[in-house]
Amino acid sequence: MPDTKPDFDIRAFRNALVEWFRREGKDYPWRRTTDPWHILVSELMLQQTTIPTVLGRYERWMR
């Protein structure tokens, strides 16, 4: 069985994904911080409910 690699350019895919996110990504409060606590809280909240619900509670919780 020959060892062949799939014809896939990972760099092009990565660049396309980053460009898509820059164009389409939403601006959420937890994306404006590098504070691990804020990011953890947002992750835990988002596991339990939806983005609109978290948006209403996240900033209150952080205060």
Image (spheres, helix red, strand yellow):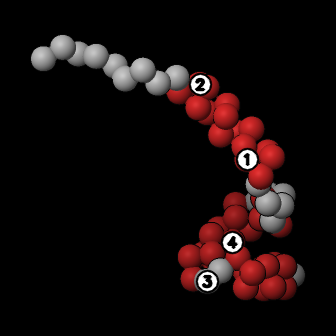
The mark nearer the N terminus, 3 or 1, is 1
The mark nearer the N terminus, 3 or 2, is 2
| Circle 2 residue | 11
The mark nearer the N terminus, 1 or 4, is 1
The mark nearer the N terminus, 4 or 2, is 2
In the displayed structure, would residue 33 be above or below residue 43?
A: above
Tag 2, which secondary structure?
Answer: helix
| Circle 3 residue | 49
Disc 1 residue type (three-letter): Phe
The mark nearer the N terminus, 2 or 1, is 2
- How would you rate the neighbour count of disc 4 (Cα within 10 Å): few for under 14, some for 14-19, many for 20 or more? many
The circle on residue 10 is: none
Tag 4, which secondary structure?
Answer: helix
Toward the viewer: 61 or 14? 14
| Circle 4 residue | 42
| Circle 1 residue | 21
Q: What's the CA distance linking mark 3 and mark 2?
A: 34 Å
The mark nearer the N terminus, 4 or 3, is 4
Residue lying farthest to the left in this orientation: 1
Q: Which mark's residue is nearer the viewer, 4 or 2?
A: 2
Q: Position of residue 59 (x, y in %)?
A: 84, 79
Q: Which mark's residue is nearer the viewer, 4 or 3?
A: 3
- Residue 11 located left or right of residue 61: left
Disc 4 residue type (three-letter): Ser
Residue at (65% x, 80% y) in the render = 50
Q: What's the CA distance linking mark 2 and mark 1?
A: 15 Å
Q: What's the CA distance linking mark 4 and mark 2?
A: 30 Å
